[in-house]
Structure formats: structure tokens, C-alpha cells
């Protein structure tokens, strides 16, 4: 295991799982954007639809796995590692992304821009909602840690089943996702044992993954016929069960894959997943615009795959390029923004 500098160990299959999830997240944004721009759908839309039930549940589940290592520490230390950490990157990239979209978010005025930034403190902006929610989940979980785990998990599951839609991203996404983060925290020992068991019995694991893949595919691609719930996978209760099953599937698949050289690119992406999440929007938009302008690729599926690949790779290259330059602060939190002294006087990485 390797230390991340955030007080959490590096576990190969955990990074592999995070890498798989971040690729699916970027793929979703890239594919839907290309499809809208080109006026149609391609084979990548099917992959995106297949991944929808488990894409974010697994990301949040994995994000909660190491919470138990720090949750009982004093508030200053805890807030530094689990709140200020994410708040720093949210605030920094909120300004960067908003500045690049100045005209769209401000109405062309400085006052409008400032109002936009103020609103973004309570209404998470764009793709940055995930980073925002991680900080919120960390605070809420520490505040509620004395509540019996089973009751807390049941309440979180009830919120997910309720399919809350208020129009406020913070509330809606909290209700929809908190149960997975909480499960990662409360069930971490069982999840790690599951990963070990998956590696110990690879044949059984592959068979189980195959059965899950068929079930997930059928439910994710079949219309429900119920207003407000486009597929069977999105129905209340079904959504929760399929999200949990998908998260478990990614955990076991990542555990198997991590023993293969094929895991290396996903593991690296997982180690730097937040760098991808923060910066993928710019290469994604630029590549999509270039493909549309040149017309060099007319197949929507292939164009979506190209945009996805570029949007994943460019942030990784950027993070590596700025790592030892004055621009390191884009992906590493400087010591000045710590609430508690960094371990061994090291800068805290984004991932």
C-alpha cells in the first residue's frame, strides 16, 4: 500500500475501480455531448446507458471506504483531510470553469459573475457537484456517526428510494447518492473481504459478473413505461438494488483486473481521478468542436470514443506537466490551504 498523502492508503484494486468509474463518467459527458452536437446516437450511447445504474454509486462507495481511518479524529484534522481538501478544489475549479464560461454564467457583467460564484456556494456548479458532495457527505457522516449504523443506512436507503426531485442539486444528489458513500464507510471491512474472495475464486467471480452484466443490461436498456422513470433500472427500489449490485460488481471486477497488466492505465487514472474530473471538460469540448468542424469522423460512436479518450488523457498529461512547476496548485493543495500540518511537510494530492 502507498500513502496518498491524504491519510489514506493506496490499494491497487481501489484505484483500478476509481479509474474505471472516472472513465465511465467522462464517457457519459463526452458521448451525450457528441450525440447532441451531431444529432443522433452511436454505439457508445448503449455503453453509457449500461453503465448508468452503477457509474456514480460505485464512485461514492469507493470514496467512503477509508473514512473510518479519520472520522474519529479531532474536527480540525478531519476537516482538513475530508472537507477543506475538496472545498479547495471545488473553489479553485469553480473560478477556472466559470471564467472560461464568463459570458454564459455572468450575462457579461462582473456583478453577474460574482452573483454566479455566490450561488455556486449553495448550488453546485456543473460537473463539480461530485467534489462538492464529497465534502458534504464527510461532514454529515461525522455528525451522525453515533447513530446506530443499521438505522442510519436504512434512512439513507429510504432517501434514495424516495426519488427526491426538488430542483436543488445539493438536496437531490444528496438523497440519491448518500447511501452509497455511507455503505462504503460502514461496510468497508466486508467490501475488502469481498475483493479478496473475488481474487481467491476467479471462476465463480467471472460467472457472477456475467450474470450481473446480463441483468444490469436488460434493466438498464428496457423502458419502464412509468412517467419520470425512463428505464426499469431507474424505478424506485430497483435503482437502489441495481446500484448496490453494480458497485459490488465493479469492486470484484477491479480486484480481478488489478492482478493483470491491463489494469495499469485504469489504476493510474484512479490515482489521479480527481485531476481528470476537474479538467476533462476543456479537452472534451475542444475535441468535440474540432471533430465537428473538420468532419474527419462522421460516425457518432467513434467520435464519442475519440472525445472520451482525449478528455481522459489530456488532464493526466496536464497534471504531470505542472506537477513540479508554479502551476502545481491546480491539482495539489498548497500547504497554505491546510487546516492542519500536512504529513511529512508534503503537499496533499488531489486524488
Image: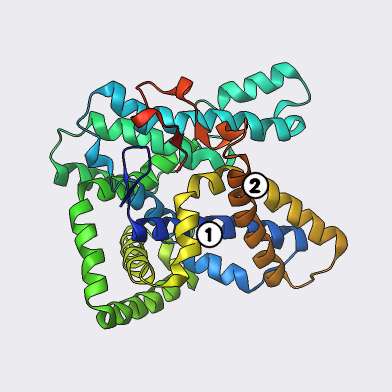
Neighbours of disc 2 within 10 Å: few (<14), some (14-19), many (20+): some
**Image-based side of 94 in relation to 8, left or right:** right
Residue at 22% over, 41% down: 68
Residue at 57% over, 40% down: 323
Which residue occupies the foreground of this view, 214 or 16? 16
**Image-based side of 165 in relation to 35, left or right:** left
Residue at 65% over, 67% down: 305
Q: Which mark is residue 274?
A: none
Question: Which residue reaches farthest left?
Answer: 148
* Residue 130 percent location from the top left of the image: 47, 42
In which quadrant will I find the C terminus?
A: top left
- Which secondary structure lies at badge 1? helix
Q: Earlier in the sequence, mark 2 or mark 1?
A: 1
Q: Quadrant of residue 311?
A: bottom right
* Residue 271 percent location from the top left of the image: 45, 51
Which residue occupies the foreground of this view, 312 or 343? 343
Q: Quadrant of residue 108?
A: top right
* Residue 262 percent location from the top left of the image: 47, 71
Asked whether the viewer can see residue 262, the reply is: yes
Vertical placement of 177 versus 105: above or below? below
Residue at 19% over, 34% down: 145
Question: Which residue reaches farthest top?
Answer: 111
Q: Give the alpha-carbon distance from disc 2 to disc 1, as whole Å.
A: 13 Å
Q: Which residue is mark 1?
A: 23
Q: Quadrant of residue 134?
A: top left
* Residue 35 percent location from the top left of the image: 70, 62
- Which secondary structure lies at badge 2? helix
Vertical placement of 257 versus 324: above or below? below
**Image-based side of 152 in relation to 10, left or right:** left
Q: Which residue is mark 2?
A: 281
Amino acid at each position: 500500500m502507498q500513502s496518498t498523502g491524504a491519510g489514506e492508503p493506496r490499494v491497487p484494486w481501489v484505484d483500478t475501480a476509481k479509474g474505471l468509474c472516472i472513465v465511465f463518467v467522462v464517457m457519459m459527458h463526452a458521448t451525450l455531448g457528441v450525440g447532441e452536437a451531431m444529432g443522433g446516437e452511436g454505439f457508445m450511447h448503449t455503453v453509457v446507458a449500461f453503465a448508468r445504474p452503477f457509474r456514480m454509486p460505485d464512485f461514492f462507495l469507493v470514496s467512503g471506504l477509508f473514512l473510518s481511518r479519520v472520522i474519529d479524529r479531532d474536527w480540525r484534522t478531519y476537516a482538513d483531510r475530508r472537507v477543506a481538501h475538496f472545498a479547495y478544489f471545488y473553489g479553485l475549479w469553480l473560478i477556472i470553469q466559470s471564467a472560461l464560461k464568463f459570458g454564459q454564467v455572468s450575462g457579461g457583467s462582473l456583478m453577474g459573475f460574482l452573483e454566479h460564484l455566490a450561488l455556486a456556494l449553495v448550488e453546485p456548479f456543473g460537473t463539480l457537484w461530485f467534489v462538492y458532495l464529497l465534502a458534504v457527505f464527510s461532514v454529515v457522516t461525522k455528525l451522525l456517526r453515533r447513530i446506530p449504523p443499521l438505522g442510519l443506512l436504512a434512512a439513507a436507503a429510504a432517501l434514495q428510494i424516495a426519488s427526491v426531485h426538488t430542483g436543488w442539486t445539493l438536496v437531490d444528489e444528496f438523497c440519491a447518492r448518500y447511501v452509497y458513500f455511507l455503505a462504503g464507510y460502514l461496510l468497508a471491512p466486508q467490501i475488502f473481504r469481498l475483493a479478496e474472495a473475488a481474487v481467491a475464486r476467479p471462476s465463480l467471480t467471472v460467472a457472477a459478473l456475467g450474470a450481473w452484466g446480463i441483468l444490469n443490461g436488460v434493466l438498464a436498456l428496457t423502458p419502464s413505461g412509468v412517467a419520470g422513470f425512463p428505464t426499469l433500472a431507474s424505478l424506485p427500489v430497483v435503482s437502489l438494488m441495481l446500484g448496490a449490485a453494480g458497485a459490488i460488481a465493479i469492486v470484484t471486477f477491479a480486484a480481478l483486473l488489478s492482478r493483470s497488466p491491463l489494469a495499469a492505465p485504469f489504476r493510474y487514472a484512479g490515482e489521479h481521478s480527481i485531476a481528470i474530473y476537474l479538467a476533462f471538460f476543456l479537452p472534451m469540448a475542444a475535441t468535440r468542436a474540432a471533430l465537428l468542424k473538420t468532419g474527419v469522423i462522421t460516425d457518432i460512436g467513434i467520435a464519442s470514443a475519440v472525445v472520451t479518450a482525449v478528455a481522459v488523457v489530456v488532464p493526466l498529461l496536464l497534471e504531470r506537466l505542472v506537477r513540479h512547476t508554479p502551476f502545481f496548485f491546480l491539482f495539489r493543495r498548497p500547504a497554505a490551504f491546510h487546516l492542519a500540518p500536512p504529513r511529512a511537510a508534503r503537499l496533499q494530492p488531489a486524488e
